[in-house]
Image (spheres, rainbow, N blue to C red):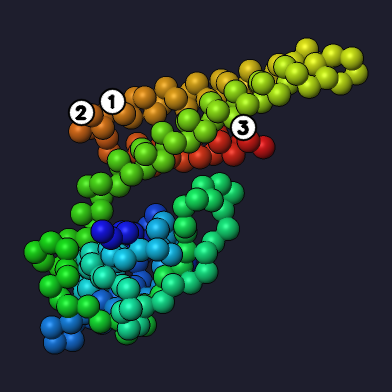
Amino acid sequence: DLVTAIAMTEPGTGSDLAAIATTARRDGDDYVINGAKTFITNGYHADLVCIVCRTGPEAGGKGVSLVMAEVQGLAGFRRGRLLDKIGQHTVDTCELFFEDMRVPCGNLLGVDEGQGFRQLMEQLPRERLIIAVGGVATLQRAIEETLAYVMQRKIFGQTLMQMQNTRFKLAECQTLATIARTFVDDCIGKAIRDELDNPTSAMAKWWVSDTVGKVVD
């Protein structure tokens, strides 16, 4: 019934969730929310947005909370431009802006304020793992597509596959893909056993994303 989005990343804040600047200030029975988000998946079509915001003056993650907002027609809510991406063009990604946007205090996710950082950390490893799994699949597909091309493309009377440099490069790419897949398989096992932690999932996301860039280049 509703398209959802998690409004986490900000123009000046990526993975450092403790540095979130968007604020939710209590005013009577409402939160008044001000701030901006970027790179928000489903942001352009979202009906229900989970906003990561600062509800208290406490430093770091202690003052971070999650507030839900049904944003269609909501005063003070504005969607920015759709962002250009290298891939995943079927997924809308955009900026979101909150200017004195009011939502009921009952829309706080959880019982108490200041629990948002912990709530996010509980699920972030799995989210990062999903990105890594998709990256590994992209790696292997890119290699397969390249193999099909170099097997039939001819230059100077021979296929590209017959050239030593081509084989060296493909061997290098397949080695990187195998390492990435092995790492991600280990992370999947840890996730199944509920042992996957944030540093390991962050490494998997970074390694696979970096490797995809190298192979595609």
**Which secondary structure lies at badge 2?**
loop
Q: Where does the image place residue 25, in percent across and percent down from the top left? A: 23, 81
Query: Which image quarter is the N terminus in?
Result: bottom left
Residue extending farthest to the left is 111
In this picture, is 85 found above or below 142?
A: below
Reading the image, the residue beneath label 2 is 193
Secondary structure beneath disc 1? Answer: helix
Give the residue type that dot 3 points to.
Val
Q: Residue at x 41, y 26 (%)?
A: 183
Examine the image and state in which quarter residue 76 appears.
bottom left
For the point 23% across and 67% down, the residue is 68
Mark 3 and mark 1: span between their CA atoms?
A: 26 Å
* Residue matched to label 3: 215
Of the numbered discs in the image, which one, if any, rests on residue 189?
Answer: 1
Question: Percent x, y for residue 44?
Answer: 43, 64
Within 10 Å of disc 1 (Cα), the crowding (few <14, some 14-19, many 20+) is few
Residue 208 horizontal/vertical position (percent): 48, 35
Up-down relation of residue 44 to residue 26 (above or below): above
Q: Are marks 2 and 1 in contact (CB under 8 Å)?
A: yes
For marks 3 and 2, the one nearer the N-term is 2
Q: Position of residue 109 (x, y in %)?
A: 17, 63
Residue 191 in sight in this render? yes
